[in-house]
Image (cartoon, rainbow, N blue to C red):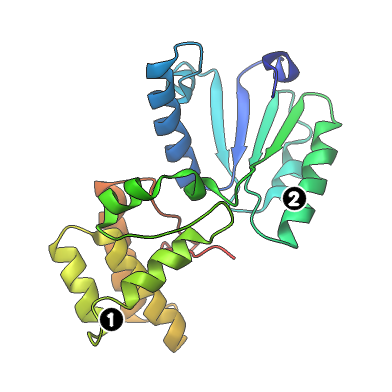
Amino acid sequence: MIERSAIAGPGPVLAVVEGKHDIEFLKRISRLLHGQDEHLPDLGALEAEARLVFMPTGGELQAWATRLAALPQPQFFLIDREAAPTSTERETLAQTLNQQAGRVAHVTSKRASENYLHPAAVLEATGMVVEFDDVSNVPDLLASKVVKSPVGDAPTAVAVKHIVKGRCGLAALVLHHDTRRQRLPITSPTIATARATRGLAIARSPGRLRQNAHGIPRPRH
């Protein structure tokens, strides 16, 4: 367990996470938990009070750890475990950070934040039954299931059906999977459509899926 005193220091706490959707997830889940137990912090409220500042790294954890080393603010790093050999590298990074004054790092016990979701929540959000455990690559499982259903439909047709039903996140996954399969260039109209669809998904329900530097869903490895 991480003690509050371990990150006591001047100014707001810097909460270093991997992506902006991790921030949304943490704020939402902490709000729900705070509603059940007021002793647990509401991270969104702390952010609004300027007591907490989230910093997404885009997965470049080591680089950002180096950049932030000179800052006086206390720092907390939440690191997705991922899969081996990445998990070993991240454990090593966390051990190094925990030996430095004013810094606390924690590696998740599960692969990533989406593994903490209940399958029922995924069913409610997507309309699909997806079975996964603590080490499953949830985005890949969901993308694979989306592309395979309904059988026989072209990816674009499948995406359109999801958009009509308001499932823009799933539509973006279908299009992204197709761009990877065809190895399309960044300038491809399909990727542009995936970006636009992804934007609709974020606007309607932010925080459910991750995205890469090009603004389209990023499967985890």
- The percent position of residue 70, horizontal first and vertical second, equals 79, 32
Residue lying at 52% horizontally and 46% vertically, measured from the top left: 113
Q: Is residue 183 above or below residue 108?
A: below
Three-letter residue code for mark 1: Pro
Three-letter residue code for mark 2: Arg
- The percent position of residue 217, horizontal first and vertical second, equals 42, 63
Q: Is residue 43 above or below residue 95?
A: above
Report the disc number at residue 168. none
Residue lying at 50% horizontally and 65% vertically, measured from the top left: 219
Residue lying at 54% horizontally and 59% vertically, measured from the top left: 136
Q: Is residue 47 above or below residue 185?
A: above
Outermost residue, left direction?
A: 164
Q: Dot 1: within a 10 Å radius of its alpha carbon, few (fewer than 14), some, or many (20 or more) residues?
A: many
Q: Which residue is mark 1?
A: 155
Report the disc number at residue 90. 2
Label 2 sits on a secondary structure element that is helix
